[in-house]
Image (tube, rainbow, N blue to C red):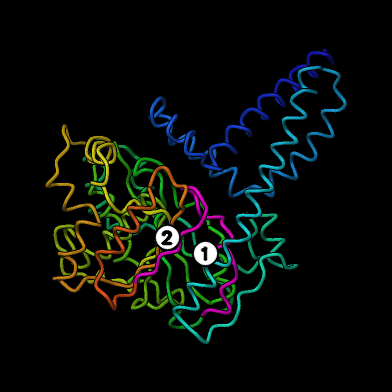
């Protein structure tokens, strides 16, 4: 029995080494690897991006785990496992390269902040006592953060309609809820960050409080709101966008009770959440997306997009996916896309004076939302509009990057 357990552990170790190697190769983004994936395994590009994101964002944690595992594997006398031990040493070096690249991202932030504010002070090094502890444990949470969970932002009539349109799927009301996070004693007029989760418009939830949200709460006195919204394929887009606007309505009407400023709401989202954040800001007060609350003010003050899906027309596979898998259309409808792709909505938003300051953070190695999409999006904005773009050596997942999680005290 003991031999069987040893064999299973050794097999698991070998498998983990293989997965680590693939993840690191994908994260380092060799052109040949990307070309190979696109040519032969396009349907698995998202899985590869997830693996590479985990490798890049949690490289320090992987190094520590690997150092422990390679010591334990010495206890086993399996030849194959010992061979993979040497491969794992190479993996540790690969994780070290990824971690070093993460640390250098702070220079990108410093350079951009200096352009915006010449009087800003240098950012603190990420490798200091407090921030290094946060880096080692990306799931840290201050004890002073208070969560007000599962608040319904939809009206009774909207919930009933959601049930009717889904043949009384009673999971739907939970998709129309939000969580409010506060820190310290309640005060008036705190700025509000409303986070819209990603997940390809089909998965995801409000349940993760990201590091940059925790920092805004504890160091900058913000109020944070994480929202759910109904998902495809059960609910076709633009149901997602309408729900985001319902959440904005609730925040406008109720956030003052939590110490937030209803007139200072900034939207933030990653991937699909970045798309919804951009669309919500550029269609503010548009009755088309506010059924039953057409007269309610849904304006916001800004958008922070992390690897946002900002152009649905940039590539055929993006258009096909959004039309068929998200919007439940039977074909690719270019007219529909032009109305729901932020990059194409910009001219109309300008005419209606619906352009707000944008901050985009994008990864040069992102294979799901290519960096060119962000560059082209930026180019469509008029001079003088507040639009800032950070380009860093990262993949699609940026939510635990030091650029996003570093202390912002010096640049407020």
Vertical order, 411 against 209 (above or below): below
Mark 2 burial class by Cα count in 10 Å: few <14, some 14-19, many 20+:
many
What number is the disc on residue 213?
Answer: 1
Q: How far across and down, in percent of the image, does residue 336 sit?
A: 14, 47
Instruction: Please tell me whether residue 409 belongs to the stretch shown in magenta.
Output: yes
99 left or right of 235 in image: right
Question: Which residue: 72% across, 44% down?
Answer: 63
Q: Quadrant of the N terminus?
A: top right
Label 1 element class: helix
Question: Which residue: 16% across, 32% down?
Answer: 330
In the image, the segment drawn in magenta is 387-412
Q: Nearer the viewer, residue 153 or 106?
A: 106
Q: How far across and down, in percent of the image, does residue 28 sit?
A: 56, 43
3 left or right of 183 in image: right
* Residue under pointer 2: 195
Label 2 element class: strand
């Amino acid at each position: 029995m003991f031999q069987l357990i040893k064999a299973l552990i050794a097999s698991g170790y070998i498998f983990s080494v293989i997965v680590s190697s693939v993840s690191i190769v994908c994260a380092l983004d060799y052109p040949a690897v990307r070309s190979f994936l696109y040519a032969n395994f396009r349907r698995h590009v998202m899985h590869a991006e997830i693996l590479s994101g985990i490798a890049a964002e949690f490289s320090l944690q992987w190094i520590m785990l690997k150092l422990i595992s390679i010591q334990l594997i010495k206890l086993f006398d399996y030849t194959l496992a010992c061979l993979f031990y040497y491969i794992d040493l190479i993996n540790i070096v690969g994780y070290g390269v990824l971690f070093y690249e993460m640390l250098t991202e702070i220079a990108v932030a410093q350079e951009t902040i200096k352009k915006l504010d010449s009087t800003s002070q240098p950012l603190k090094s990420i490798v200091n006592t407090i921030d290094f502890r946060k880096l080692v444990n990306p799931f840290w949470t201050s004890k002073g953060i208070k969560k007000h969970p599962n608040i319904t932002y939809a009206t009774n009539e909207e919930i009933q309609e959601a049930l009717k349109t889904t043949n009384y799927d009673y999971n739907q009301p939970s998709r129309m809820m939000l969580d409010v996070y506060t820190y310290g004693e309640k005060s008036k007029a705190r700025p509000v960050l409303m986070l819209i989760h990603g997940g390809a418009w089909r998965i995801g939830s409000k349940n993760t409080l990201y590091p940059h949200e925790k920092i805004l709460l504890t160091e900058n006195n913000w109020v944070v709101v994480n929202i759910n919204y109904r998902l495809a394929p059960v609910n076709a887009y633009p149901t997602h966008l309408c729900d985001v606007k319902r959440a904005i309505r609730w925040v406008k009407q109720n956030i003052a009770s939590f110490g937030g400023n209803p007139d200072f709401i900034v939207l933030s989202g990653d991937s699909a959440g970045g798309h919804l954040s951009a669309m919500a800001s550029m269609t503010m007060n548009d009755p088309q997306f506010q059924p039953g609350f057409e007269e309610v003010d849904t304006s916001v003050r800004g958008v922070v997009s992390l690897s946002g899906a900002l152009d649905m027309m940039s590539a055929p596979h993006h258009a096909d996916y959004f039309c068929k898998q998200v919007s439940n259309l039977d074909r690719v409808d270019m007219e529909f896309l032009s109305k729901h792709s932020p990059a194409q909505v910009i001219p109309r938003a300008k005419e209606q004076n619906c352009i707000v300051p944008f901050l985009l953070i994008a990864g040069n190695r992102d294979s799901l939302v290519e960096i060119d999409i962000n560059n082209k999006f930026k180019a469509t904005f008029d001079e003088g509009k507040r639009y800032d773009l950070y380009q860093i050596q990262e993949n699609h997942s940026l939510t635990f990057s030091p650029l996003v999680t570093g202390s912002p005290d010096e640049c407020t």
